[in-house]
């Protein structure tokens, strides 16, 4: 991946940070993105750059805002000269239901989880197509009928899988691939928003573990998950994965296999 430039959205924590670090470990220069304290984010950039010996810049785009999502791609291209890899990882999962969800919350969830994915893909594609090389990786849960109280998140993530397949088919043969990585249960700030606090995330663990065939081993899976998801992303960015296109790859300890 040396010489490649990757943009990873929502990469200041959790799965996005795990993916960003694996791409950096492979030699890719990075733009990382996320909300939060500017000084802390700049410090994170310096740390990743020091550990992996790559160039790292920060893009503070709020992906609920369409203009900022498009500008993120422009900013990364200006700062790094090019973008070869786009990882759409940013996402939120506020608790809601189709009956009670407020329209504003629905709109924000769809904007971050789905519209920003479309906008960044649309903004980055011209340069990837010109060079006839690009990797687009989206992150979405393998949607399940048993998801509870997540109507906007479910709707948006189904949309991400559909969009991914559409982009992959449209671009087949152009040197650009588009795939989805589908994590299982990964404790992260995102998961804690399901119940609005970390205790809620912990309360969900036993239930999730029962559903996951690896069972108690799930704990060790949890601890390694961002790293493992990052390794899969790195594989998808390799030339060996040139024919892997338009697929949703579960990394969920066998949960979806049930
Ligand atoms: P996380 O909360 O650590 O990561 C989400 C990231 O998105 C954060 O870095 C956050 O800053 C960023 N983000 C949120 N709103 C944003 C905005 N308006 N603009 C820019 N960035 C924004 O949680 P995570 O679990 O690492 O989630 C990462 C992705 O993985 C999400 O898309 C989520 O749907 C998906 N996922 C997570 C799990 C899980 O169990 N954790 C399972 C399946 C899928």
Image: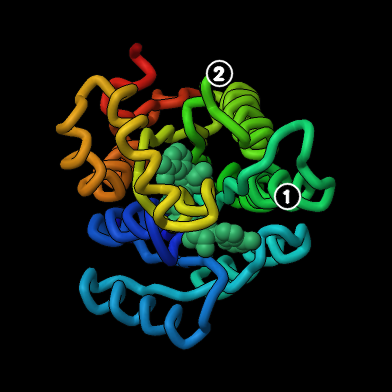
x%, y% of residue 212? 29, 24
Location of the C terminus by quadrant is top left
Q: At which x and y percent is residue 100?
A: 77, 39
Q: Is residue 54 visible?
A: yes
Image location (x, y in percent) of residue 12: 43, 66
Q: Which residue sits at x=62%, y=44%? A: 95
Relative horizontal placement of residue 239, taking residue 53 as reference (left or right): right
In the figure, is residue 244 to the left or right of 146? left
Q: Can you name the residue that lies furthest to the right here?
A: 103
Q: CA distance from mark 2 to mark 1?
A: 23 Å
Q: In the image, is 109 to the left or to the right of 39? A: right
Residue at 56% x, 50% y is 91
Location of residue 157 in the rendering, given as x and y in whole percent from the top left corner? 60, 34
Task: Answer above or below: position of 28 versus 110.
Answer: below
Q: Is residue 137 visible?
A: no
Between 186 and 33, the one lying in front of the other is 186
Label 2 SS: loop
Q: Give the label on residue 145, or none.
A: 2
Q: Is residue 209 above or below residue 115?
A: above
Secondary element type, mark 1: helix
Precedes in sequence: disc 2 or disc 1: 1
* Quarter of the view holding residue 183: top left
Of the pair 204 and 190, the residue shown nearer to us: 204
Please name which of the two marks, 2 or 1, marks the residue nearer to the observer.
2
Foreground: 156 or 214? 214
Residue 111 image label: 1
Ligand 1 has an atom within 8 Å of the beta carbon of the residue at disc 1? yes
Mark 1 nearby-residue class (10 Å; few <14, some 14–19, many ≥20): many
54 relative position to 94: left or right: left
Answer yes or no: do the residues labelled 2 and 1 have beta carbons within 8 Å? no
- Res 16 label: none
């Amino acid at each position: 991946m040396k010489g490649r430039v990757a943009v990873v959205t929502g990469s200041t924590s959790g799965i996005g940070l795990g993916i960003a670090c694996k791409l950096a470990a492979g030699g890719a220069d990075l733009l990382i993105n996320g909300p939060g304290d500017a000084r802390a984010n700049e410090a994170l950039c310096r740390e990743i750059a020091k550990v992996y010996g790559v160039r790292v810049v920060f893009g503070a785009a709020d992906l609920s805002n369409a203009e900022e999502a498009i500008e993120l791609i422009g900013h990364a291209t200006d700062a790094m000269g090019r973008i070869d890899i786009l990882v759409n990882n940013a996402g939120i999962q506020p608790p809601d239901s189709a009956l009670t969800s407020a329209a504003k919350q629905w709109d924000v969830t769809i904007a971050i989880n789905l519209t920003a994915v479309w906008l960044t893909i649309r903004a980055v594609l011209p340069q990837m197509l010109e060079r006839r090389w690009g990797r687009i990786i989206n992150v979405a849960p393998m949607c399940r009928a048993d998801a509870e109280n997540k109507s906007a998140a479910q709707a948006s993530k189904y949309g991400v899988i559909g969009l991914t397949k559409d982009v992959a088919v449209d671009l087949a043969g152009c040197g650009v691939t588009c795939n989805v990585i589908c994590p299982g249960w990964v404790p992260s700030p995102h998961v804690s928003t399901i119940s609005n606090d970390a205790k809620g995330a912990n309360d969900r663990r036993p239930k999730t573990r029962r559903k996951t065939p690896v069972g108690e081993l799930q704990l060790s899976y949890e601890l390694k998950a961002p790293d493992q998801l990052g390794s899969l992303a790195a594989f998808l960015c390799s030339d060996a994965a040139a024919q892997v296109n338009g697929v949703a790859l579960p990394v969920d300890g066998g949960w979806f296999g049930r």
